[in-house]
Amino acid sequence: MRQRIAVYGGTFDPVHNGHLKVAEAIVSAFGMDRMLFVPAYVPPHKRGQEITSPFHRMAMLALATAGRERMFVSAIELEAPARPYTIETLQTLRNEWPESQLFFLMGADSFKDMVIWREYERILSEYNVIVATRTGYLAGRQPAEHLDRDLQQRVVDLRRQQLPRPADLTSEHIYLTDYVNVDVSATDVRDAAERGAKIDHLVPPSAAEYIAKYGLYQKK
Ligand code: ATP
């Protein structure tokens, strides 16, 4: 069987329990061999808000994944000279792992927004895509109605369903899943840290320690 690699892209400012619970559920449901967290660089001129240094974001991901056997962090987007688009990152990873099957993992909010992404149709048709539910998203009967008919036909709705049998995952599809629903966002974590409130229930202990130690998300 081909090796399965999930690619979880995002800002991860910071990584939180929502990301980790989703990643764990997807590793076990889809029999992933690897879950690759890929933090985005986000250049200064594209930042609508202050975004934490990529080195801090990467360090927190490294700490959060250290004890999780199949989870890894990749610096692929941080090392790229020009900020790559997701389709380019996926292409690079495919070249790096030609024998593997790649699954791009995203939350349901990103799935709704991705129609403005560069070559999003290619992402949705040339790669397996897994959409994880998120409070307020992926609730209705037609969660893929923002996509054209051809793309809609690729959708495999696994919501309220048994886990897929790993052997069934042969060709490229868009899988809608609701294995876990964790109502946490990075914005919640930053807001709580800024108020001086506890964040231990929102992020893994290593990230909470790191945020406190380096004074991240404090009011300047
Ligand atoms: P922010 O609050 O700063 O917008 P965020 O919590 O959405 O951040 P990102 O790093 O932007 O986190 O998200 C990376 C990916 O993880 C996106 O595809 C997003 O949809 C998904 N994601 C984030 N939080 C959750 C969650 N609680 N449940 C499911 N998916 C999530």
Image: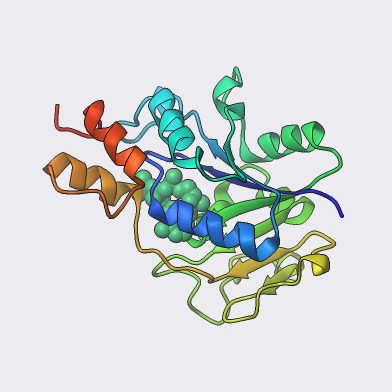
Q: Nearer the viewer, residue 132 or 151?
A: 132
Residue 149 x %, y %: 73, 70
User: In percent of the image, x 34 and y 35: which residue is there?
Assistant: 48
User: In percent of the image, x 57 and y 27: which residue is there?
Assistant: 75
Q: Is residue 56 above or below residue 64?
A: above
Q: Nearer the viewer, residue 92 or 165?
A: 165
Q: Classify the position of the C terminus by image quarter.
A: top left
The chosen color scheme is: rainbow
Q: Nearer the viewer, residue 175 or 36?
A: 36
Q: Is residue 171 above or below residue 122?
A: below
Q: Nearer the viewer, residue 25 or 158?
A: 25
Q: Is residue 179 above or below residue 101?
A: below
Residue 90 x %, y %: 70, 39
Relative to 151, is 213 on the left or the right?
left
User: In percent of the image, x 21 and y 46: which residue is there?
Assistant: 191
Q: Is residue 197 above or below residue 130?
A: above
Q: Quadrant of residue 31?
A: bottom right
Relative to 215, is 76 on the left or the right?
right
Q: Quadrant of residue 45?
A: top left
Q: Classify the position of the N terminus by image quarter.
A: bottom right
Residue 30 x %, y %: 69, 62
Residue 24 x %, y %: 54, 57
User: In percent of the image, x 43 and y 26: which residue is there?
Assistant: 54
Relative to 128, is 195 on the left or the right?
left
Q: Quadrant of residue 15?
A: top left
